[in-house]
Image (tube, rainbow, N blue to C red):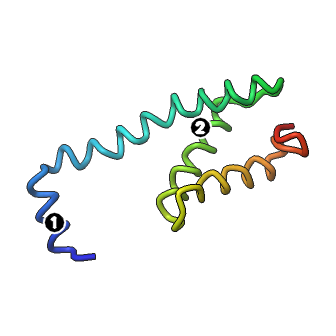
Amino acid sequence: MNVRQISEVVLQVGANTVALMPALIFAISVPMAQRQRVVIATNGHQLSICDAWSSILIGMFFNQVLPTSIGGDVVRGVNAELCGKVGDDGVR
């Protein structure tokens, strides 16, 4: 990672745009959480918006950190298992 190149790109794009990016990513996580709630509700189970949103944010984080494209989904599954939301049928 070349810090000089990164700083040049940030200067070209503008600090306001760079600051707006995390806000937009954070904002799209809310509809994603609602979608997750709908999917789980179709299986006859309930998930609070807070649980769904934290699960989405955890998944988004690990999608960036882990070297796979499905790493965040695996972590979300493990998180759901630990919270008691998933069982043998996929959702508890």
- Quarter of the figure with residue 42: top right
Instruction: Give the percent coordinates (x, y) of residue 23.
Output: 35, 40
> Looking at the picture, which amino acid does disc 1 mark?
Ser
Viewport quadrant of the C terminus = top right
Residue corresponding to mark 1? 7
Left or right of residue 75: residue 84: right
Q: Which mark is residue 90?
A: none
The residue at 65%/36% (across/down) is 52
**Label 2 crowd bin: few (<14), some (14–19), many (20+), radius 10 Å:** many
How far apart marks 2 and 1 lie (CA) works out to: 32 Å
Circles 2 and 1: CB atoms closer than 8 Å: no
Instruction: Give the percent coordinates (x, y) of residue 18.
Output: 23, 49
What is the tally of numbered marks visible in this picture? 2
> Looking at the picture, which amino acid does disc 2 mark?
Trp
Q: Which mark is residue 53?
A: 2
74, above or below 51, in the image: below
Left or right of residue 56: residue 29: left
The residue at 54%/33% (across/down) is 32
Viewport quadrant of the N terminus = bottom left
The residue at 59%/27% (across/down) is 34
67, above or below 17, in the image: below
Q: Does dot 2 land on a helix, a strand or a loop? A: helix
Instruction: Give the percent coordinates (x, y) of residue 10.
Output: 16, 58
Q: Does dot 1 land on a helix, a strand or a loop? A: helix
Nearer the N terminus, badge 2 or badge 1?
1
Left or right of residue 59: residue 79: right
Instruction: Give the percent coordinates (x, y) of residue 66.
Output: 54, 66
Farthest-out residue, bottom? 2
**Label 1 crowd bin: few (<14), some (14–19), many (20+), radius 10 Å:** few
